Amino acid sequence: MRQLLQVLAIVGLVIASMAQTPAAPSGQADKKQPDPCTVSGRVVTAAEGAPVKSARVALVEQNAGRPPHVLAASTDNDGRFDIRKVNPGRYAFVASHSGFISQPYQARGTSDGAILALAPGQQVNDVLFRLVRGAVITGRVIDEAGEPMVAVAVSVLQKPSAEEIEEAGPRGKKRELIELSSATTDDRGEYRVFGLKSGDYYIKAAETDGPHGPPIMDGVDWMIRDLLGSQYAPLFYPGVFQLDQAQAVSPRAGEEVQADFAMRHVKMVEVSGRIIAADGGPATHVYVELSVPEVGDWSQRLSAITDAKGEFTIKSVLPGSYILSAQQHDQDKYYGARQKLEVGEEKIGSITIAFGGGASIPGRIITARAGANALDRIHVLLLSANDDEGALAYAEVKKDGSFQFKDVADGSYALQVSGMENGWFVKSARMGGEDVYQKGAQIEKGASAGSLEIMLSSDGAQLEGSVRDKEHDQPIAGAQVRVKFDPETPYNRSCSHSASTDQNGHFSFDALPPGKYRVVAKLPSATPEVPAISSDPTTVTVGEREHQAVQIKLATPKTE
């Protein structure tokens, strides 16, 4: 699902231009290009088979650099599309239209679909997308007097799937709900969330200034609310405060369900305090936030910015358990702190957070070839390796590859490096001589074992193969293949990789760090109620620049 969301985000950036023939990359204009490909087909409704006019269809090339190579087209009156001059390669392929659920190529149930693999000169002219009409959740939000409430944020949340929990690791195990979509009530107090898949959803309404678009209230009203804060507690449908009392709504494809809210005044409190900078003075312009750890939405993220005295006040806080976080980003310095906070029925005004009390960790990124990576585009994070949400650290990487973590709290951390050029990977990461991917980055009593040295390499391994039906020996398109270090630890989870098989059942991983891996294929189910089918794990060991192939067999259901 995450891959599909990334594809749709990319498509949204390029769809307006509908460019089908991008310019050749710099330095390649004089090289002989392989024969181009053509991809054509139709987009129809799943229920009636009727053509869908003005549907958007896009090809997003895999492993093609930044920004990725994207080609797009829209359908005509007969639902037909035709994309020409497509370079050979492997593409994510998706069709979308307002009011319908976006459909990946050869998708199964909730999967990200199959990759479309194109050989030089290949013509694929029989693609058929069957779009399913999205479900709709709509409703009205009123106050105790029955008056409509304007600019209330309504979040649509869902329990994460087993695959999403596995991918998130220990930090995601406590996340009970994640936000899928949201809307804001209008002047009639009405909201509408559309384009949802069939499923079970939890609805939450909160009167708060969250990132749900620009305020639609009168400027004076908005200023007054910001000054006074809200006295309406966030509610889960059908009007309860606690998640364990909430009821799910279950719209099916093309169905519209009603979920109304009657907001209630409750006693809420203020949470205030001050942030002390690393030099002992007031920490100004610090972003301070209260969030509910179990619910991954934006509607109840209460926040404030510290003033010239380093002081902050967060209003309209409902009693309960929160994560209090403070972040300051000043040029190449980043300070952050997180702690658990229990809020009762009385005002809290004595919170003090001091930056600079944690460890300072210098580091450097080294590459095998100078200029091979724009080092200042690489992101380096330290994430808590246990299930505690209270610790993370971030460092800005300079052009020479140097960086420094500031104020890192005691704990055990996993390293995450992103933003490398295609074909590159982290060959090694050591802190004080210890392998960070094996033993983690350990911070004790405000100190680390030494500097962090990260070496990047382009001498990775390639692992490819196919997924086939165990009984009929037929290729399986759209299977999800995941490779994990063997053994997998809380510190090397970021080295795991996932890919979808193409229409021929083929998959490929490039630039894998050398090592021992477990390879597992999963066939997503047609419905969320049915678990995915997994293969037996295959163990493979790869070395630098080595190429290996594996074949995985899956026992598909008899109905397949």
Image: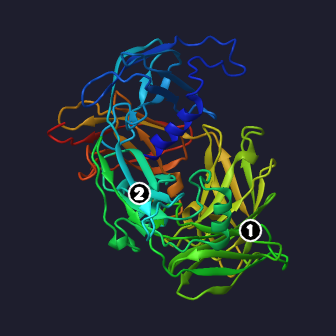
Indicate which disc, 2 or 1, sits on the residue closer to the N terminus: 2
Judged from the image, the secondary structure of the residue bearing numbered disc 1 is: loop
Asked whether residue 510 appears in the rendered view, the answer is: no
Residue 204 place in picture, x, y as percent: 43, 63
Q: Residue at x 42, y 27 (%)?
A: 116
Mark 2 or mark 1, which is nearer to you? 2
Image coordinates of residue 422 in percent, x first then y, are 61, 37
What amino acid is at disc 2? Arg
Q: Position of residue 292 (x, y in %)?
A: 51, 71
Q: Which residue is mark 2?
A: 140
Look at mark 1 in the image and give the residue it sits on: 286
Colour mapping used in the image: rainbow
Q: Is residue 246 above or below residue 554?
A: below
Residue drawn at the location 78% of the way across and 75% of the way down: 310
Q: Would you place residue 197 above or below residue 32 in this image?
A: below
Count of numbered tags: 2
Q: Amino acid at mark 1?
A: Val
Residue 229 figure quarter? bottom right
- Residue 22 marker: none
Residue in front for this viewpoint, 152 or 195 = 152
